[in-house]
Image (tube, helix red, strand yellow):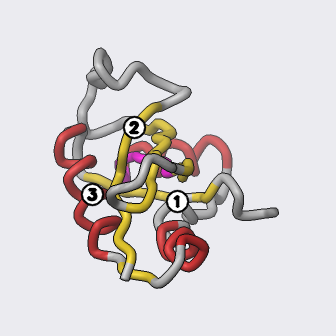
Amino acid sequence: MMRATIKDYTSPDIDLDEFFPENPGDFGFLLQIYVGPRGEESQESFEVFVCTSKWIGRWVSNNGPLVGRGLLLVEEYSLNSIKNFLEKIVESFESYDWEDMAKKISRIGRWEFEEY
């Protein structure tokens, strides 16, 4: 059986090393997680939008309905808590091959090869 692990995190929206929201209970940003089979070098990207319910409320008020796929809803900002949560979920999955594993992980975030 294969298990996956998160190998890296990036964001096109923020600098993960420097970011701390002015209001930790009201923020949203795109988080890319790079996941691959445990013990192997390969990795693929999955996108998760991390935000609070307050951020969603404000966004919907200003823009209308929001589809929630690939959404990680948190109470307040804590990068360590976000990472720990994602790692616990990703590392709990088991599969016989990478394609099936990637489909499981894509329930959390959009897989870069999802539409191929």
Principal secondary structure, stretch drawn in magenta: strand
**What residue is disc 1 on?**
109
Mark 2: amino acid: Tyr
> From mark 1 to mark 2, how far is it between C-alphas?
13 Å
> Badge 3: how crowded within 10 Å, few (<14), some, or many (20+)?
some
Residue 55: image quadrant is top left
Q: Quadrant of residue 89?
A: bottom left
Residue at which label 3 appears: 87
How far apart marks 3 and 1 lie (CA) works out to: 13 Å
Residue shown at 31% from the left, 57% from the top:
86
- Measured in 3D between alpha carbons, the distance from the residue under mark 3 to the one under mark 2, in whole angstroms, is 11 Å
Residue 22 is left or right of residue 69, and the answer is left
Q: Earlier in the sequence, mark 3 or mark 2?
A: 2
Helix, strand or loop under label 1: loop
Where are the magenta residues, as a range?
48-53
Find numbered disc 2 in the image and state the secondary structure of the residue it sits on: strand
Q: Is residue 63 left or right of residue 109?
A: right
- Nearer to us of marks 1 and 2 is 2
**Helix, strand or loop for disc 3:** helix
Residue hosting label 2: 9
Q: Amino acid at mark 1?
A: Gly
Q: Which residue is drawn at the image coordinates 71% and 63% (left, top)?
A: 114
Tell me the quadrant of the picture where the C terminus can be found.
Answer: bottom right
User: Considering only order in the chain, which callout, 2 or 1, is on the residue closer to the N terminus?
Assistant: 2
Q: Residue at left 49%, top 51%?
A: 48
Choose between 100 and 15: the one closer to the eye: 100
Q: Residues within 10 Å of mark 2 (few under 14, many from 20)?
A: some
